[in-house]
Amino acid sequence: MEKIKTFIHRLFVPHEENNFRAKSLHTDFLTVYLVIAFLMMIAFKQDNNVLGFATDISVDKLYQLTNEQRQNNGLSPLSLNSALTLAAQRKAENMFSENYWSHYSLDGKTPWDFILGAGYQYEYAGENLAKNFLFSNGVVDAWMNSTTHRDNLLKKEYTEVGYAIVNGVLNGEQTTLVVQEFGKPIASSFTPPSVQVSVPQQILAQKTVQPKINVFNFTFSLNIVFMVFLLLALALDFYYASKFNVIRVGGKNTAHFLFIVFILIGLFMSTIGTII
């Protein structure tokens, strides 16, 4: 117990034995952390069968958030449609197979072709796309912050919607594609097609092997814990240095602060996706 107490004291409190600088703020400690993080990143990247894909995006959540936005704007909620879901699934798979990121395929196939090909005869139809997002809220928020995507979400003529969330490799990058297809059927002629949708209504963003480790959540949490640890160390270092009137010729608190800022920027950038 005494050894643990001494270790914690050296780790956080500046005193004679640690050259009046908390051990956790020494350069060697930060270097060890960066080396471990780098090695973990390499190790995880080399085993795709272990990592697979893992996000917190689901059809249920996207559907819920979409209808919340519509109801908040005085519009009727959309109903899920199996044909639109099939069209969305085929569109996502086509983007992966032909390696493009656009509303239009390389051979000129349009969103309307996918919708008609799924047996949906529409009076109105539209499409929203997103990729590289980690959470359903982020997808819908990004759509709402874009004029064209917001217009689709809040188009009063739409009555139905379908979703696909598919993982794969696009332009050499492992990514998650989200496809949202809107529609209003031609009332006089439309009957729901008897098609077997290839994905269940409750879709997690996952098409490959079920991941044993959610690498993003793990590394994200690790970085958050480290930043809290470092902030605590900085606060204690400042407190005890002031309390004991420790005078330092060259302080490194600014460097440590910048270190935290850069980690935060990196974590923020890793959660930003793309919409079209």
Image (tube, grey):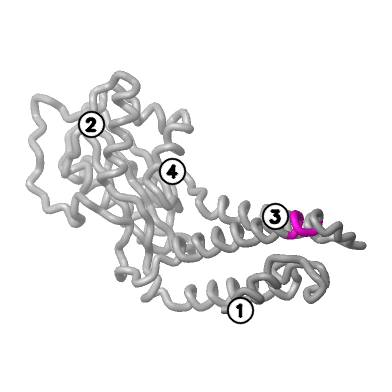
Looking at numbered disc 3 in the image, what kind of residue is underneath it? Ala
Point out the frontmost of discs 2 and 4: 4
Q: Where is residue 34 drawn, in percent x and y?
A: 64, 71
Magenta-tinted stretch: 237-241
Instruction: Please indicate whether residue 262 sits to the left or right of residue 135 in the image.
Output: right
Measure how far apart labels 2 and 4 are at the Cα level. Answer: 20 Å
Which secondary structure, mark 2?
A: loop
Which secondary structure, mark 4?
A: helix
Measure how far apart labels 2 and 3 are at the Cα level. Answer: 51 Å
On screen, residue 253 above or below 86: below
Camera-side residue: 64 or 242? Answer: 242
Q: Where is residue 88 drawn, in percent x and y?
A: 27, 47
Camera-side residue: 41 or 8? Answer: 8
| Residue holding disc 4 | 138
| Residue holding disc 2 | 78
> Circles 4 and 3: CB distance less than 8 Å?
no
> Circles 2 and 3: CB distance less than 8 Å?
no
Which corner quadrant holds the C terminus? top left
Measure how far apart labels 4 and 1 are at the Cα level. Answer: 48 Å
Q: Residue visible at 43% across and 54% down?
A: 100
Crowding at label 3, few (<14), some or many (≥20) Cα neighbours within 10 Å? some
On screen, residue 186 above or below 118: above
Disc on res. 88? none
| Residue holding disc 3 | 235
Disc on res. 2? 1
Measure how far apart labels 1 and 2 are at the Cα level. Answer: 64 Å
